[in-house]
Amino acid sequence: MMHEFYFAHLLWVGVWILLILPPFWTIFAKAGFSPWLSLLMLVPLVNLVVLYMVAFSRWPTQSRQRDL
């Protein structure tokens, strides 16, 4: 019975990861940041720090557009 719970829990976590990571991966890549930052979205409280960092920092893509 406990094995069924573990399997269901792992399945739920896997589905959650597959739903959360791709949008953040794309957002970070388009903003000019490393897409690997999306992995930090899985860590509670760290995800808020990363979002604030990205929201209020100068984006590398903005710097490139100004240079043109």
Image (cartoon, rainbow, N blue to C red):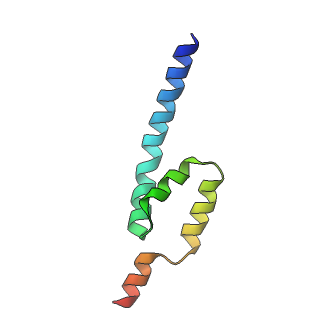
Measured from the top left, where is residue 5 in percent x and y? 56, 18
As displayed, is residue 1 above or below residue 57?
Answer: above
As displayed, is residue 48 above or below residue 59?
Answer: above
Nearest the eye: 2 or 56: 2
Measured from the top left, where is residue 26 in percent x and y? 39, 58
Q: Residue furthest bottom?
A: 67
Q: Residue furthest right?
A: 45
Nearest the eye: 27 or 42: 42
Measured from the top left, where is residue 8 in percent x and y? 51, 22
Which quadrant of the figure has residue 65?
A: bottom left
Q: Residue at x 59, y 68 (%)?
A: 53
Q: Residue furthest left?
A: 68
Q: Residue at x 47, y 75 (%)?
A: 59
Measured from the top left, where is residue 20 in percent x and y? 47, 46
The C terminus - image quarter: bottom left
As displayed, is residue 55 above or below residue 7?
Answer: below
Q: Residue at x 50, y 28 (%)?
A: 10
As displayed, is residue 53 above or below residue 44?
Answer: below
